[in-house]
Image (tube, rainbow, N blue to C red):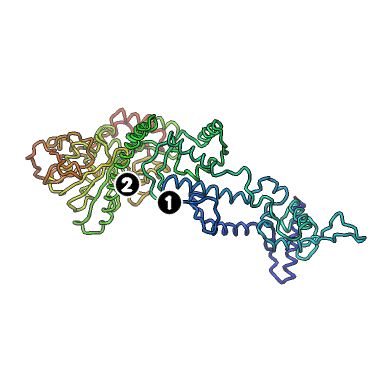
Amino acid sequence: MAEEFRMSKLALALERRRCRRNGQCTRPTTLPGARGVGILIRQKLESVYSNHFGRTPVSTPFASQELDESCEVDYEVDNDDIDTTGGILEGRVRDYILQQEIVDEDTDSDGNGEAELDESDIEVAEYCALTDIKKVCKYGYDRATATTKKGKKRQRMRYTFKFNGSIVCRITFHLCYDIGRSALQGLMAHMATNGIVPRTHGNTGRRPKHALTFDDVQRVVKFFLNYAEREGLPMPAAPRGRDNIPPTYLPASETKLKTFKEYEKQAVEAPIRCVKLTAFKTIWSTCVPHIKIASPRDDVCATCEKIRKRVMDAVEEDDKNEAADAYSAHITKAQQERELYNDCIRRSTETRHTAECERYHHFTFDFAESVSLPHYYRQMGPLFFLSLRKISIFGFRIDGDPHQLNFLIDENEAKGKDGSKSHGPDAVISMIDWALQNYGGQSTSCSIHADNCTGLNKNKYLVGYFMWRVMTGQHSTIEYLMQIIGHAKCLVDSGFGNAKRLYRRTDCESLDQLEDVVNKFSYSNTAVRYPAWSWRNLKGFLGDHFKALNGIRKYQYFRFSSTEPVRTSRDAEEDTQNVLKDPAFRFETQARPDVVQAAGFSHPRQESLYKCVRQYVRPPYQDILCPVPNTL
C-alpha cells in the first residue's frame, strides 16, 4: 500500500511539472491510458452497430432488429411470412443467430486473451487505435539496437521508459499508463516482431466450433411450442401494442429450470444437441416471448377456470379445440361488456362541461373489502387472531367529474346489530338514493354500472327502486348494466385501491383517522360518514308493489322507462318484463318510507371489544374505539 501511494504521488508530481512548464493549470488532469481509450472505442462501436444493424428495442432484446441493405446476412428473409406466427418466430431465430455471430467475433474462444493482454489493451489493438499505440510505443519506451557493438545479434533487448519526454522507471510507467505487466510484455514482443501495427486476434472472422446453428435454435423453439400447446393455456388475442401472437401461459408451478430439465431429458432421448441453461433462457426470451409463466392470482373468473381446466385435461384434439373455442367466446363477450363500460365513461367525461340537459350521466357503485380498527402498519401478533371493529366501505362514483363517494359504515352504525344488514338491499338502496339526490344532477336520464352480484345488486328490490324513480318522474329513463361475472373490475375498485395503499402504511385507531386517510390520498375520493344519509325500510316499501323477475341471474342489462315495462336486452326490443304486481298501479308521490335508526352494538360485542381489543389501543382512543360496555 505504501509503494502504491508513493507511485501515485510521483505520477501527480510529474503531471504538475509538465503543466507548470507549459503554463497550464496545475490541477492534475486525467492521465492517458488504455482504459479511457477503451471506453471511447466502446462508444464508437455502439454507434457503428446501431447504424449498421439497426437500433435494438430495450423491452425485447434482438427481437425486432431492422437490417440495413448493406449488411450481409446468410439467411433470406421472406417478408410475406412475417405476418404469420411461423414467419415471426423464424425471423426471431434469424436475429438471434445473427446476434450470436456479432458477439462471437469479439469473443476470445480459447480464453487466453486475459493472460496474454490486458482487456483494455486488446480493445486498443483490435479496434485500430493506431495513434495511441504509436504514442505508447514511440514515446513510452525506446527500443535498443538489434546488434551489439561487436556486430553480434542482441539476445536481450533493453528498453528506456519515458513519460511526457522524461525517463521514468518501469513501475512509474505502469502506473501512468494504467497498463499491466503481461499486457506491456505482449505489446513489446509484438512491436519487436511486427513493428508499430495493430494486433489482430487469431479467431477474428472465424465462427467458433461450439456456436449454435439455425437448426439448433429452431429445435429449441419447436420444443417451446409443443410444450406450451400441451401444458399451457392460450389466450384468444394478443395484448394491445404487441405483435400478432396471442400469449400462452404455463401453470404458475412451472419454472424455467423445470422446463429446461424436461427439454434436456427429451434432447438426450432423441438424441440431439442440448443447449445450456443460459442459452435456453435467452432463446426463450428472444424467440418465444409470448410463452409466459402465469402468476398466482385470486378472485379470478370461475368460468375461465373451469374452461381452462377443460383445455388442460383434454386428451383428444377435438375436445381441446372445443374448450378453446368456448374460452374464446367467453373472453370475447367479456371484452364487449368492457368496451361498453369504457364507452360510457368516455361519453360522461366528454359531456361534463355541456349544458345539464345535454349531459350524459354515468354512475358506478360497488362494495370494498371491509377494513378493521385499530390498524397499525406494524401489526402486533395477537391482533391477527382477534375480532376487531369492522368498517364497511361502499363506493359510489360519479364518472363524469370524476368524483367517488366512499360511505364508511361502522359496526354500531349499521342497520342491524353488530354491523349486520350493512350489505342488504335496504342499505344499498338507501345510500344510492342519497347519492342520486345530492349528486345525480338535473338530467332526466342516466346509466349505472354495478357488480354482477345477484343477492346484492341484482334483485327485485333494486329493480323496483329504479322503476319507482322513473314512475315518479325523477328520471325519464335509467339504464342499469352489469359486466360479466369475474370480469367486473371498474374505476370504483381503483379508488378503493388508492385509499388502501395509504391505509396499509398508516396507524388508524378511530373512524376520524380513517376518514382522513380516505380524503387525503386522492382528490377524487371523499369520505361520507353516518348520519349524513339515513337508513330506510325500502325493502318492505318496494316489496309490496314489485315482484321478482323470472331468471334474473341471466340478465345483464335493464332499461327502465315510465312508458314501457322493464327491457332486459339492448338489441331485442321485445325482451320486456312487467315487474309490477298490479300492472295498473302507479305511485302518486315521491314520498319515501320512514327513517330507521342504526341498531348499534349488542352487549356481548361490547364486552369482546373492551376485554380483548382495548389493551392494544393507545389511551386517547380507548374510549372511542372500545368503550366500557353499556355506554353505547
Name the residue nearer the viewer: 427 or 50.
50
User: Is any part of residue 592 visible from this angle?
Assistant: no
Seen as rendered, the residue at the extreme left is 584
Mark 2 — residue? 491
* Residues marked 1 and 2 touching at CB (< 8 Å): no
Among the 4 quarters of the image, the one containing residue 428: top left
Q: Is residue 431 left or right of residue 86?
A: left
Say if 148 sits above or below 93 in the image: below
User: Is any part of residue 307 visible from this angle?
Assistant: yes
- Select label 1 or label 2 by which is in front: 1
Residue under the image location 54 percent in, 30 percent down: 269
**How many residues crowd mark 1 within 10 Å: few (<14), some (14–19), many (20+)?**
few
Q: Is residue 217 left or right of residue 632?
A: right
- The tag earlier along the polypeptide, 1 or 2, is 1
Name which residue type carries label 1: Asp
What percent of the width, then of the height, locates residue 107?
64, 49
Name the residue nearer the viewer: 342 or 539.
342
Callout 2: SS:
helix
Q: Is residue 226 left or right of residue 561?
A: right
What percent of the width, then of the height, locates residue 535?
21, 39
Distance CA(mark 1)–CA(mark 2): 43 Å
